[in-house]
């Protein structure tokens, strides 16, 4: 890669949480891979109607007893530098559902630092520790877990089995370092042979320009993460391939919805059929599907993703710090409320400014919306339930 291209990757690569990224490597898509008796009739066995009649405990019934402020905190993923994770101990102690690690080189003792951070979680209910460990120039902890090449390289040179095997090796090391969620794979269909940039959010981040290749590679990557004990987040629904711009830097449009349904949706359908636990929704407007960013659209999330595609897992927004969100007339707190109203379960924002103040503002906006009747409490409970479910937390055990 030329120096100019390397700088483009460093300054302009968008990787799911919205901020310009620091590349772990300046090589192109061919970056080398680092070496790498009869059952008793308990309540749980009763039919649903009899279980309900028996007043069975569920996460939803438990969450119904939580305060709005505690529910709100569970829907927020707080950004933090991977070199100073203790900086969000107060937010985690207040019940934040997750943290998003930023940086390009993880400290050698990251695992012990995250273990200490998790000790602050109320009720020890677990914490989603997320990072962007896609491969190529978008890797935050390759120094600890080993390197993956760009998705474009994997899609071209590796079989699905090889993708799964190599990803599983990295995932196992991520899990050992107490990171349990990866904001990947990217299943956008984009065959351009370029680094991600201000005008193209994908480029080498995409496995291929061939929908079938992306579908198979995306599922293989997803299964590799799961095999290594890390929760994959499939992104960026409903597909950024062919976008007009990078939403981190301004308003952006996807391909028209009729085209996207044929080209961009199949990889998400394949991932859902393969058991995808989490999906990230983009900040792009989808022509033919509404005028608001997909992350704030009930049509995109509730009607299409939940309804037509039947997705039942965790729905995460892309970063609400994106310029596309502010250009649409939303502050981060008001966007968070709209995202939850639209069917999202967890909201994210970028590292920068006062994280504590921003977290408080988001939580306050959510609780105020519930109190004012602008956000149904049942929707907030549902969102919180999805956050707990992806971590397999059972409040009744």
Image (cartoon, grey):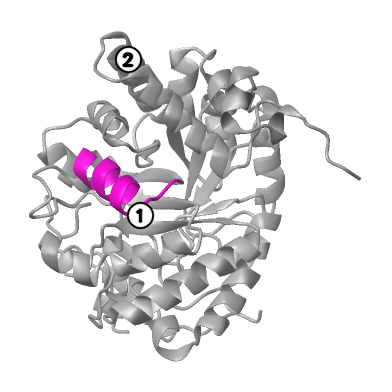
The label on residue 16 is 1
Viewer-nearest residue: 294 or 251: 294
The structure residue drawn at horizontal position 56% and vertical position 47%, both measured from the top left corner, is 83
The structure residue drawn at horizontal position 35% and vertical position 42%, both measured from the top left corner, is 350
Looking at the picture, does residue 116 appear above or below residue 216? Answer: above
User: Can you give x and y, in whole percent of width and height, for residue 52 in the image?
Assistant: 58, 22
Q: Using the rendered image of the protein, determine whether residue 193 is visible from the camera's viewpoint.
A: yes
Viewer-nearest residue: 313 or 237: 313
Circles 1 and 2, Cβ within 8 Å, touching? The answer is: no
User: Can you give x and y, in whole percent of width and height, for residue 1 in the image?
Assistant: 32, 84
Tell whether position 151 is magenta. no
The structure residue drawn at horizontal position 18% and vertical position 41%, both measured from the top left corner, is 325
Local SS, label 2: helix
Local SS, label 1: loop
Q: Which residue is mark 2?
A: 370
User: Can you give x and y, in whole percent of width and height, for residue 321 in the image?
Assistant: 27, 40
Dividing the picture into quarters, in which one does residue 30 lie? bottom left
Tell me which segment is drawn in magenta: 297-312
């Amino acid at each position: 890669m030329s120096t100019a291209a390397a700088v483009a990757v460093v300054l302009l690569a968008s990787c799911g949480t919205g901020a310009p990224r620091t590349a772990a490597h300046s090589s192109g898509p061919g970056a080398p891979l680092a070496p790498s008796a009869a059952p008793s009739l308990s309540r749980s066995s009763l039919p649903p109607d009899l279980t309900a009649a028996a007043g069975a405990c569920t996460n939803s019934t438990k969450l119904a007893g939580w305060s709005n402020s505690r529910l709100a905190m569970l829907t927020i993923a707080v950004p933090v530098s991977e070199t100073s994770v203790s900086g969000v101990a107060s937010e985690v102690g207040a019940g934040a559902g997750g943290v998003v690690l930023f940086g390009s080189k993880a400290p050698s003792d990251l695992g012990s630092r995250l273990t200490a951070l998790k000790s602050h979680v109320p009720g020890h209910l677990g914490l989603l520790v997320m990072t962007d460990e896609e491969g190529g120039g978008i890797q935050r902890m390759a120094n600890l877990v080993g390197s993956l090449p760009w998705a474009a390289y994997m899609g071209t040179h590796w079989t699905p089995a090889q993708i799964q095997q190599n990803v599983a090796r990295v995932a196992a090391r991520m899990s050992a370092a107490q990171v349990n969620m990866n904001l990947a794979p990217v299943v956008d269909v984009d065959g351009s042979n370029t680094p991600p940039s201000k005008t193209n959010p994908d480029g080498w981040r995409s496995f291929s320009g061939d929908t079938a290749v992306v579908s198979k590679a995306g599922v293989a990557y997803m299964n590799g993460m799961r095999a290594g004990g890390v929760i994959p987040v499939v992104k960026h629904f409903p597909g950024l391939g062919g976008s007009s711009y990078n939403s981190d830097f301004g308003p952006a449009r996807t391909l028209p919805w009729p085209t996207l349904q044929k080209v961009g949706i199949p990889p998400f359908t394949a991932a859902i059929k393969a058991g995808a636990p989490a999906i990230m929704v983009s900040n792009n407007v989808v022509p033919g599907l509404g005028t608001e960013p997909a992350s704030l659209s009930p049509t995109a999330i509730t009607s299409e993703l939940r309804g037509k595609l039947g997705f039942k897992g965790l729905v995460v927004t892309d970063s609400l710090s994106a310029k596309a969100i502010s250009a649409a007339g939303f502050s981060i707190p008001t966007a968070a409320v709209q995202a939850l109203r639209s069917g999202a379960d967890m909201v994210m924002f970028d590292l920068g400014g006062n994280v504590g103040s921003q977290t408080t503002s988001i939580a306050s906006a959510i609780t105020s919306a519930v109190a004012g009747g602008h956000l149904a409490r049942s929707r907030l409970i549902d969102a919180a339930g999805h956050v707990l479910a992806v971590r397999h937390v059972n409040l009744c055990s």
